[in-house]
Amino acid sequence: MNKNTQITDAQIMDSMLKKRYEYARSQIKDYCHIFRPKTRWELIRLTLLIVGIQFTYAAETAFVTPILLGIGLSHTFMTMVWAVSPTLGFFCAPLLASVSDQIRLEWGRRRPVLLALGVGLMLGLLILPHGARIGVWFGDDLTGQGFRWGVLMTVIGLILVDFNVETCNGMARTYFMDMCIRDDHPKVLTIAVMIGGFGGFAGYMLGSIVWSRTNIGIFLGSNEATVFASVVLIVLIGLITTLSSFREIPLPLMQIRIDEMLRPISRVAIEEERKRLLSLNSVSGSTTLQPETDDRITICTSEDDETPISLKLFLVNLIRMPRALRILYLTQFLSHMGYLSYCLYFTDFVGREVFGGNVSALEGSEEFYLYNEGVRFGCVGMAVFILSSSLYSMVIERLINKFGARPIYIGGLILNSFGMVVMAIFKIKATVFVCCITMGIKYATMYSLPFLLISHYHLNNSFDKKDKILPQIVQKRGFGADISTLSSMLFLAQVIISLSIGSIIDAFGTTTIVVYSAGLFSSLAAFAATQVWFMDL
C-alpha cells in the first residue's frame, strides 16, 4: 500500500461492521445479525407484516365506505367518522414512537409496540364488518330507529383498524431499518413496498369475489365479513413472522459505554474511527491514510449522546424542527392528501360515475346492481394500483442510482397528477386501469424515498448543509419519532380530507371531485418536492 492512501467511508464502515459482528456473535445472546447484510429471503421474512397491513388497506378502501353508507350515513357524516382515528393518530402516533425510543425491555423497543398495535388491529377487523349485527344484540330495532348501536360499534371498529394499521405501518418501517445495516435500508424499504404490493393485490382481488354465493360467505354472513375474517388471519401470520424474525438489542445494552460495540454505527463513530486509523498509522510510521478530498462533503463532528430523548425533548423537537424535515413532511402531507382523495372514495367513484349505480337504490334494482358491480370493478382497479406499486418498487432503486432521487421523486408525483386528471375527464373502464398504474408509481415512491432520506439525515446526524459542510445538529432527535412523524402526515391528511371532501361531494352531487382533488394535491406535492434536501442520493 502506498503512502497517503485514501480511505473511504465504505471501507471504514465495512471494517467497523466486521468488528461489531464478531463481538455481537460472542455475546450470551447472539446479536450479530444487526451488523451483517441480510439475504433477500431474510428481508422478506422481516417485512412480512406489511402484507397484512396492505390486506387491511385493501379491505378498508373497498368496503368501509359502502359499509358506512349502507347503515344510513350521509357522505358528510361518514367523512366526519373517518376523521376520528386520524385525529387520534396525528397526536398519539409520534408520542408512541417516542416512547418506543425509550423502552428498556429485554424483548426490545419496537417489537412490544408492534405486538400491541397488531392485537388492536385484529380486534378492530373483527368488529368492523359486524357492527350492525352487534348493534342488534344491544337492542337496535331495524324497523324503528335503525342502526343506533350498530353505528357506534362500526365506528369503534373503524377507529381501531385505522389508527392501529397506520401507526403499525410507520413503526414497522422503523423496526425494519433498526434491524438492517445502512446498505440494506434501500433494499428493505423497497422489498416492503414490493411484498406489500403483492399482498394488496391479493387483498383487492379477494374483495372482488362474490363471497355471498359461496358456502364460506353464507356461513360468515356477507362479502365483508368473509374478507375481513381472511384479513385477520393474514395479519396474524405476518405479525408472528415479523416479530420472530430478528432479535432486537435491548436499549440498556446500547447505553453502556463499556459496550459501545453493540451500538448502531453513526457518522460520528465513522469519523472517530478515521481519526484513530490516522493516528495509529502516523505513530507506526507506515502508511498514512488520508480522508477523501475530492468534492466530498465534510462532517463537523460533535459528541455522540447515547441517551434516548425524553418525552419533553421530543415535544420541543416538534416545534424546533430542522428545515429539511419540515419540507419533507410537507411533501409527504400533500402526497397523502392526493392519495387519500383517491383511495378512500375510489370504489364509490367507480360505482357511481363509471357504472352509473346508486348505493341508496332499492335492493334488487338495476342501479343497486350496477353500483355493486362498480365496487367490485373498483376492487380490481385497486388491485392494479397496488400491483403496479409492487412492480415499480423492484426498479426504483436502480432508477435512483442512475438518475438520482430528485427526478424520480418529483417525476412520480407529476405523473400521478396527470393520470388523475385523465381519469376524471374520461370516466371509462380503460382509464380506471391506466390511472391506477400512475397511483401505484406514486405510492411506491412516497413509501420508500422519504423514509430513506430520514435514514440518511440521522446517519449523518445533519439536517442541513452549508457549502460543503454538514454541521452536526445540536438537538438530539429520535429516529423512531422522526419516522413516525413522517407516517403521521397520513393522519393529518386524512383529518382534513375527512372533514371537507364529504361536504363538497354532497354539495356538488358527484364523486368526480375526489379525483380532481387527487390530481391537484399531487401537483402541489411535486412542487414541494423541488425544495427537498436529497443529500447524496
Image (spheres, rainbow, N blue to C red):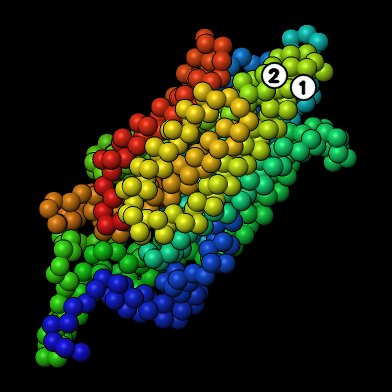
Q: CA distance from mark 2 to mark 1?
A: 7 Å
Q: Which residue is mark 1?
A: 369
Q: Amino acid at mark 2?
A: Gly
Q: Is residue 207 left or right of residue 400?
A: right
Camera sees residue 149: no
- Secondary structure type for disc 1: helix
Q: Residues within 10 Å of mark 1 (few under 14, many from 20)?
A: some
Q: Is residue 342 above or below residue 261?
A: above
Q: Is residue 229 left or right of residue 329?
A: right
What residue is drawn where x is 49% and y is 29%? 422
- Secondary structure type for disc 2: loop
Q: Amino acid at mark 1?
A: Tyr
Q: Which residue is mark 2?
A: 357
Q: Nearest the camera: 53 or 344? A: 344
Camera sees residue 182: yes
What residue is drawn where x is 41% and y is 43%? 412
Q: Is residue 47 above or below residue 216?
A: below
Q: Which circle's residue, 2 or 1, is located before the other in the chain? A: 2
Q: Is residue 381 above or below residue 424?
A: below
